[in-house]
Image (tube, coloured by chain):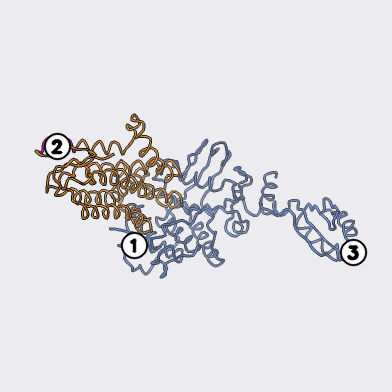
Chain colours: A orange, B blue
Amino acid sequence: MATVFNPTIAAITLRGLLGRRRSLLIALPPALLLALTIGLRVTTDINSGRDFGWPGVVLGQIGLVTLLPLTAMIIGTSVLGTEVDDSSILHLLATPVSRATVLTTKWIVASAATLVFAVVPITVAAFIGTSGYVDNPGPFDMTFTPVKGDASEAIGVIVAAAVGAVVYSAFFLFLSVVTKRSVAVTLIYILVWESLLTRQVSGLRLLSIGQYELGLADGLWDSAAAVVPGFGGGHLSF
Amino acid sequence: MTIDDIPAQRPTAVPTAAPVAGPAEVVLDNVTHWYGNVVAVNDITMTIGPGVTGLLGPNGAGKSTLLHLVSGFLAPSRGTVTVAGQTAWHNPGIYKVIGLVPERDSVYAFLTGRQFVTATAKLHKLPDIDTAVARAMHMVEMDTEAADRRIDTYSKGMRQRIKVAAALVHEPRVLLLDEPFNGMDPRQRLHMMDLLHRLGDSGHTIVFSSHILEEVERLSGTVQVIVAGRLAASGDYRRIRRLMTSRPHVFQVASSDDRTLAAALIGRPSVNGVELNPGGGLEVRAGDYGTFSRELAAVARERGVRLRTVLPADESLESVFTYLVAS
C-alpha cells in the first residue's frame, strides 16, 4: 500500500505555494473578511434591533460562499497545476514515490493551507461577529441567533468550512490533474455553477459542494438549537 | 527533517562515475505511440546497451516521446518497453534504475541547487544522503558556492547541470537525457560530454536525444536516427555519417562565366546535373558531396573561371534525414 504522506514533497509544495507572490494573493481575501467583520462590529450595535443581521451575510455569503472556494481554488490549482504546467513535476515523478502518494500529499497540503487561509479567518470572523450577540433574527431572517457571550454558536460555520476546505481542495486538485486550464474551469465552477446555476435550478444543488457546505452549517446550527436552551435555530444567508 | 536541514559541509573525497552493479538494457519491441490521431512513435524496435547512445532526429521526430516511453511517463499504444528487464509503464520502482534529465529547464527555482538534489535523494530514500548529494554535485562541477544559491539565480547551463546531478544522485544504471546540451556554453558542453563518456565507459547505459549532428558525432559511437516517428537508421555513427556526406547535394554556384563552368562540371562523374538559372548562376546537383567539394575549385581554376558564391541549397537537417529514410 502506498504511503499517504511524503514530508519531502509536502515541504517542496509548501515552499512553492508560500514562497511566491501567490501567498499575498492567498492572504488578501481573508484579510478583507477580517477587516470587514471588525469594521461592522465597531460601527454597528448588533443588539440594537436595527442591524440587518450582518454576521449571517458576512460569514455565509462572503465567508463560506466566496472566500472559501476562491482560496481553495488558488491553493488547489497551485499545488499541482503550476508544476504540471512547467513540467517540474517530472522531477517528483521520476522517483520511486508512487503517484498516489504525490497526489495525496498535495491534497493534504492544499487542505491544510486552505484551513489556515480560509477556515481560520472565517472562525475568527465568526467569533468577532457573534460573541455578545443576543437573540435577534433581524428583519430579513438571515441572521444567526446565538447565545449571548458564547462563541460556540459559530460551530456550524466552522465545521462546514473545515469540511468544505477538504472537499474543495480535493475537487480543485482533481481538476488540475484532468485539465490544463484548471484556473478557468474552477472559476467557471465557482462563479457560474455554484453562484448562478445552483441558485436558479434547485435540482443542481445536489451537485454543488457549496450547497452541501451550507446545508451542513445549517444542520449543525439547527441541531445545536435543539439541545441548547435559548439557541435560536436561524439559518445562513444565501 | 526538512529540505533546509542539509549540512553545509561536504565530504572531502568524492568518487565519480563508479562502476555499475550490472549492465542494464533498454529494450523497445514494436513500440507505437499515438497522440489522438497522430502517430508520434511508429513501430520502433531497438535494444540499447551500456555505453553512450544518441537519439538523433529533427524537432518533432518523436525523440522526446521515445524517452518518455522509456522513462515510464507514457504507455505504449502498442508494443512493450522494458528497462533492465522491468516494464517501464506503471512501475515507480523502475526509477531506482533510471535517472531522467527532462528537456525543459524548469526546476524548483525557489530551492538552492543543493536543496534540490537533497530532496531528490530523500525521495529515493538513499541511506547516506549527504555523501550521495556531495558526489552528484561534484560530478557535474556544482560543488561550488553556487550550490547554496537559489536555482532562479542560475544560468541555463547551471540549471542543466543541477538537473543532471539530481538524476545521478541515486547512481542509476540508465541515464536518459532529453536535449541535455541546450543552453550550455562550449566549456560546459565539453565537460558534460566528458562526464557522459565516463559514465558510459563505466558500464552505464546513457541515452540522450539531440537534433544537432555534431553533438552526437562527438559523444556517441552508437546512433539511433528517428525521423517522423520511425527508426530511420541505427548503428555506428561513422557509417551513418558516411551516408550523410555521400548523399546527393544541391549547390547554388555563381561565377564569372557560368556557361563555361557548367560545361566543365557536367563532364565530371561527381556531378549528376547542372542547370543555368534564368537570373544568373548555376544549380549543380552533386552525387558525392566530398568529391564535388574538392573538384569544384580545381575545375574553375583550370577553366580560368572565378567562383563568386558556392551555397549548399538543401543542408537542412530534414533533408538529411529524409535521405537517410530513403536509404
Q: Which residues are magenta?
A: A220-228
Residue A56 falls in image quadrant: top left
Element type at mark 1: helix
Principal secondary structure, stretch drawn in magenta: helix
Q: Quadrant of the N terminus of chain A?
A: top left
Closer to the camera in the image, B255 or B181: B255
Q: Are marks 2 and 1 on the same chain?
A: no
Amino acid at pointer 3: Arg
Q: Chain of mark 3?
A: B
In the picture, the quarter occupied by the C terminus of chain A is top left
**Dot 1: within a 10 Å radius of its alpha carbon, few (fewer than 14), some, or many (20 or more) residues?**
some
**Closer to the observer: label 2 or label 1?**
2
Mark 1 or mark 3, which has the lower sequence index?
Answer: 1
Separation of residues labelled 1 and 3 (CA atoms): 72 Å
Q: CA distance from mark 2 to mark 1?
A: 59 Å
Respond whether the residues carrying marks 2 and 3 are from the same subunit. Answer: no
Please indicate, yes or no, whether residue B23 appears anywhere in the rendered image: yes
Name above or below for residue B262 compared with residue B190.
above
The quadrant holding residue B304 is: bottom right
Q: Position of residue B308 (x, y in %)?
A: 81, 65
**Residue to which mark 2 is pinned:** A225
**Residue A99 at what x, y percent from top left?**
37, 44
Q: Which residue is mark 1?
A: B130
Q: Which mark identifies residue B303?
A: 3
Crowding near the residue tagged with mark 2, few <14, some 14–19, many ≥20 C-alpha atoms within 10 Å:
some
